Image: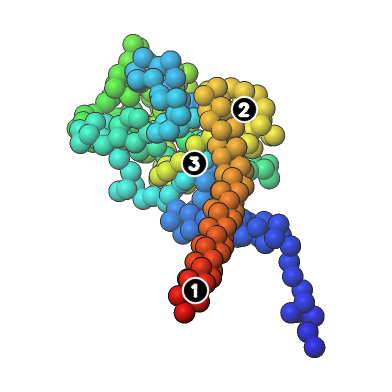
């Protein structure tokens, strides 16, 4: 007598879907363990870190792998202050991430994570320098990477504060941050405001979600296509093309691999059957020859 559990057989499609979902869950859990953040990845929603048409950088490869572009999924790893290398420090030691010196960090403007009950989208920009506010009232600032004091305002072309651009009235010590794109010639602390309309201050380490430590290019474009079509179409066209090639490979690859494997197995079975038949025929011929000789 066969039990109900022994007679229950799941369709192959259901098994394949279950394995695929399980694999995705395992990957996300491993990424979470590595990053220490949940979710462990963020979708890049704007082009503020893109290097296209920027005279400061060589033009990205067609795939755009190695730079942060609209629609990339970026792994965000927890980081302490001592883990983060600024642009000025990276330039000294030749330390680069995502096509330029220094680390790229994810942070909340002025530490505001929610507003009126709604989550606030964090910013992903490069840490350019650390500034110490020595005397807030008198406007005395110190940048340790270059061992320089500034009085009244900070002007430093290396971090986007040249040609008369400057920052002042800083309220706290923290990181000066800036996007890589041509649309971000100056630091966030000069041009950006938080959701309440206040000027963005130097990024306190407590406002930092983590630093970018890996990317899954193009696949975040799927989300943007549904939720933010304008940003999707604003992504580099090469990235959109690479996404569809990747989708074809991801979806069609297993099917093609299965077909190739089945063909291989059928060929092996046919060859094995042919060899068995040939062996049987040879034995029969040998037996007939022996009978004639007798």
Residue 141 image offset from top left, x and y in percent: 29, 31
Query: Left or right: 136 with respect to 294?
Result: left
Kindly indicate the quadrant of the structure image that contains residue 59: top left
Residue 60 image offset from top left, x and y in percent: 40, 24
Mark 1 highlights which residue? 292
Q: Residue at x 33, y 29 (%)?
A: 100
Residues 22 and 77: in front is: 22
- For label 2, the crowd category at 10 Å Cα-Cα, with few meaning under 14, some 14 to 19 and many 20 or more, is many
Q: Earlier in the sequence, mark 3 or mark 2?
A: 3
Question: Quick check: can you spot residue 166?
Answer: no
Residues 93 and 219: in front is: 219
Mark 1: secondary structure: helix
Mark 2 highlights which residue? 232
Q: CA distance from mark 3 to mark 1?
A: 74 Å
Mark 3 and mark 1 in contact? Answer it, CB < 8 Å: no
Q: Residue at x 59, y 45 (%)?
A: 256
Q: Residue at x 77, y 73 (%)?
A: 8
Vertical placement of 229 versus 172: above or below? above
Mark 3: secondary structure: strand
Mark 3 highlights which residue? 216
Q: Earlier in the sequence, mark 1 or mark 2?
A: 2
Q: Residue furthest top?
A: 163
What is the number of callouts on the image? 3
Residues 72 and 37: in front is: 72
Q: Earlier in the sequence, mark 3 or mark 1?
A: 3
Q: Residue at x 46, y 46 (%)?
A: 76
Q: CA distance from mark 3 to mark 2?
A: 16 Å
Kindly indicate the quadrant of the structure image that contains residue 233: top right
Query: Left or right: 243 with respect to 202?
Result: right
Q: CA distance from mark 1 to mark 2?
A: 83 Å
Residues 107 and 245: in front is: 245
Question: Quick check: can you spot residue 255?
Answer: yes
């Amino acid at each position: 007598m066969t039990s109900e559990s022994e007679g229950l057989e799941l369709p192959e499609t259901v098994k394949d879907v279950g394995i695929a979902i399980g694999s995705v869950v395992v990957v996300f859990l491993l990424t979470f363990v590595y990053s220490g953040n949940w979710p462990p990845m963020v979708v890049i929603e704007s082009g503020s870190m893109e290097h296209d048409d920027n005279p400061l950088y060589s033009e990205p490869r067609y795939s755009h792998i190695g730079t942060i572009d609209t629609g990339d999924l970026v792994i965000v790893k927890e980081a302490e202050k001592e883990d983060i290398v600024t642009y000025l420090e990276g330039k000294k030691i030749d330390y680069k991430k995502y096509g330029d010196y220094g680390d790229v960090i994810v942070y909340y403007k002025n530490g505001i994570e929610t507003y009126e009950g709604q989550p606030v989208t964090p910013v992903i920009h490069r840490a350019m320098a650390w500034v110490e506010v020595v005397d807030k009232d008198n406007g005395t600032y110190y940048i340790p990477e270059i061992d320089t004091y500034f009085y009244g305002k900070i002007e430093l072309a290396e971090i986007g504060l040249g040609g008369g651009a400057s920052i002042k009235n800083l309220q706290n010590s923290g990181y000066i941050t800036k996007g890589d794109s041509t649309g971000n010639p100056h630091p966030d602390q000069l041009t950006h405001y938080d959701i309440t309309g206040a000027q963005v201050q130097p990024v306190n380490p407590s406002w930092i979600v983590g630093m970018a430590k890996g990317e899954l290019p193009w696949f975040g474009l799927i989300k943007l296509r549904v939720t933010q079509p304008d940003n999707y179409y604003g992504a580099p066209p090469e990235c959109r093309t690479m996404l569809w090639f990747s989708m074809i490979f991801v979806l069609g690859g297993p099917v093609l691999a299965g077909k190739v494997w089945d063909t291989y197995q059928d060929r092996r079975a046919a060859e094995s059957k042919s060899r068995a038949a040939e062996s049987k025929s040879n034995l029969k011929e040998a037996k007939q020859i022996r009978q004639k000789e007798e």
